[in-house]
Amino acid sequence: MIFSLPVIILLAVVILGFKAFKVVPQQEAYVVERLGKFHAVLNPGLNILIPFLDSIAYKHSLKEIPLDVPSQVCITRDNTQLTVDGILYFQVTDPKRASYGSSNYILAITQLAQTTLRSVIGRMELDKTFEERDDINRTVVAALDEAAVSWGVKVLRYEIKDLVPPQEILRSMQAQITAEREKRARIAQSEGLKIEQINLATGEREAEIKKSEGEAQAAVNASQGEKVAQINRAQGEAEALRLVAQASADAIRTIAAAIQEPGGSEAVNLKVAEQYVEAFGKLAKENNTLIMPANVADLGSLVSAGMSIVKGQNQLMK
């Protein structure tokens, strides 16, 4: 197939156009070499190159890149083997140094991260490696960031994914953890029993105090009630005695008034004589012994006085 000269020229122009114009995507950087020597770094957008003189030697992503660091065996200060792996985050900050500072900056970062990690863990005991993971991460990042400056790379952070001790150590750690948990459980149980006993003793003491206070108050109330009752009884007895005395006084006054009336003295003498005779009559009925007055004449005089009084009363009534 034979092409005409214009067609050949057109094809040459198209090819040169593709070679002369280069579009760089966002967050990427292209390193241009002219005649085998570094010439420039192309920024994102449209860039013009000289065909056959300029060539794109390296392409770099300016995004943050995660890099998986392979697992490795590290030995702690107390001679315990640990299998450690992690992940590294870095970013290309200088495309020129990333192109010419190291033949393979990714491999260099990976190897440096592993050696730094072995060095850091070798200065720690086994228990500290689990407690100070953040310190290990910061130490690795500081060491990598210092060395990676000449590689045009910025190490952002490093994270340990796994710290795996041997199975024997794992079993020992599990037994230790179990014993520690049982210890805490026993301590918690004993503390609970202690608090329970304290609460029970406090409750009993308060109950006894309340009971004694109640008994004391009841005794006070009872004594006060007894006192009031005694006062009331005394007042009642006093009032009864006063009434009896008043009644006796009224009776005496009535008798005295009756005596002052005509025939009152004779009535009193008659009454006394009747009671005297009645008393001797009762004694004669109740006892086998005959009791006679010391002066029988007095008895006769009393009887005669009484008869005269009765006669006097009959005459008055007529």
Image (cartoon, rainbow, N blue to C red):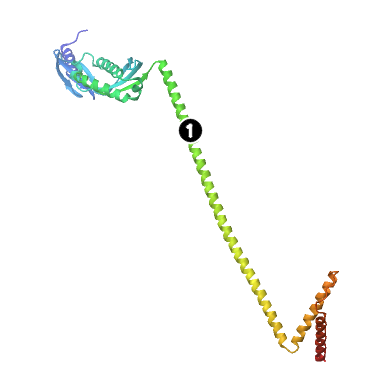
Which residue corresponds to the image point at 55% horizontal and 55% vertical from the top-left? Answer: 217
Expressed as whole percent of the image width and height from the top left, the position of residue 308 reads 82, 87
- Density class for disc 1 (Cα within 10 Å; few <14, some 14-19, many ≥20) is few
Residue type at mark 1 is Ser
Expressed as whole percent of the image width and height from the top left, the position of residue 57 reads 19, 15
Expressed as whole percent of the image width and height from the top left, the position of residue 8 reads 17, 12
In the image, 240 versus 128, the foreground residue is 240
Classify 95 as above or below 195.
above
- From where the camera sits, is residue 176 visible? yes
In the picture, the quarter occupied by the C terminus is bottom right
Classify 253 as above or below 209.
below
In the picture, the quarter occupied by the N terminus is top left
Label 1: which residue?
Answer: 190
Which residue corresponds to the image point at 63% horizontal and 72% vertical from the top-left? Answer: 239
Please tell me in which quadrant of the rendered image residue 234 appears: bottom right
Please tell me in which quadrant of the rendered image residue 254 appears: bottom right
Expressed as whole percent of the image width and height from the top left, the position of residue 306 reads 81, 84
Q: Is residue 213 left or right of residue 311?
A: left
Classify 169 as above or below 220.
above
In the image, 160 versus 291, the foreground residue is 291
Q: Residue furthest top?
A: 1
In the image, 235 versus 13, the foreground residue is 235
